[in-house]
Image (cartoon, helix red, strand yellow):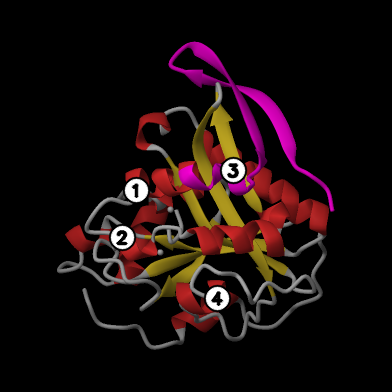
């Protein structure tokens, strides 16, 4: 097993600040839980913040997928993933199902997809590009492990403001076209992710009306022989829920 370690400079306005991206360990757990409290305030349910038992599973079952970023010694953000098999013909799932409620006991080293469990950045550090660097680092894990893709359900926290006017699919389409901006989905698009469709009842998330956008990054070094219906087509043919967990669960 390898250990991930990247040193770089980030810019706080015009000021360079030294940063490190590395695998997180047990000594980092208090800081990671604190980041969750800052990143997901109410109405996001506090019971979905990390618990030490979940974090322990992350560093035990798939330490390569447990990343954090430090800025001048301060743990400012984290990102967690697990490996799962993904069937494009059956893309529907919930966050709880695919992440084992965040415990990742369903991690499958023989899977083909790195699934994002969570990405969180302290609000006071969000203008420094930490989220993009964490995402880029996880793309590198995908390439290193020889996986087909990175996948995850992106929250749609701006949707509750538009739910009376349009469906979740229409909202996502307008965000992709640049007609609307969403704090999470727009960020993921800027990180190189592409939407495959909308998943209803993904997570208990009032702001997103429990919807999420399934967002993919394909490994450019992986040639897939798959020629059947795309996940987008499969999602579009699935019934959508009514209604008008991070980034991900988050």
Asked if marks 3 and 2 touch (Cβ < 8 Å), the reply is: no
Q: Tag 2: Cα neighbours inside 10 Å, few (<14), some, or many (≥20)?
A: few
Residue bearing mark 2: 46
Asked if marks 1 and 2 touch (Cβ < 8 Å), the reply is: yes
In the rendered image, residue 21 lying in the magenta stretch gets the answer yes
Q: Tag 1: Cα neighbours inside 10 Å, few (<14), some, or many (≥20)?
A: some
* Residue at position x 60%, y 59% in the image: 56
Residue bearing mark 1: 37
Q: Which mark is residue 102?
A: none
Q: Which mark is residue 98?
A: 4
In the image, is residue 186 above or below residue 118? above
In the rendered image, residue 234 lying in the magenta stretch gets the answer no
* Residue at position x 45%, y 58% in the image: 50
* Residue at position x 23%, y 55% in the image: 42
* Residue 221 visible here: no
Q: Secondary structure at mark 2?
A: helix
């Amino acid at each position: 097993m390898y250990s991930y370690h990247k040193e770089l400079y980030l810019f706080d306005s015009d000021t360079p600040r030294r940063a490190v991206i590395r695998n997180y360990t047990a000594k980092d757990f208090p800081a990671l839980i604190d980041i969750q409290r800052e990143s997901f305030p109410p109405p996001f349910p506090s019971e979905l913040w990390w618990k030490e038992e979940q974090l322990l599973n992350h560093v035990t079952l798939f330490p390569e997928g447990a990343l954090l970023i430090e800025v001048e010694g301060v743990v400012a953000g984290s990102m967690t993933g697990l490996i799962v098999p993904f069937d494009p013909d059956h893309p529907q799932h919930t966050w709880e199902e695919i992440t084992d409620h965040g415990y990742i006991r369903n991690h499958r080293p023989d899977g083909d997809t790195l699934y994002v469990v969570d990405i969180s950045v302290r609000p006071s550090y969000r203008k420094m590009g930490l989220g993009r660097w964490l995402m880029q680092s996880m793309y590198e894990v995908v390439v290193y492990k020889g996986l087909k893709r990175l996948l995850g359900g992106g929250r749609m926290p701006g949707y509750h403001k538009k739910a009376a006017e349009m469906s979740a699919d229409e909202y996502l389409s307008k965000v992709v076209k640049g007609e609307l901006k969403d704090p999470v989905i727009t960020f993921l698009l800027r990180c190189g992710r592409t939407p495959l469709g909308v998943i209803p009842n993904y997570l208990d998330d009032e702001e997103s009306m429990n919807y999420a956008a399934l967002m993919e990054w394909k490994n450019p070094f992986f040639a897939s022989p798959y020629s059947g219906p795309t996940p987008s087509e499969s999602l579009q043919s699935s019934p959508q829920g009514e209604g008008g967990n991070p980034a991900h669960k988050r």
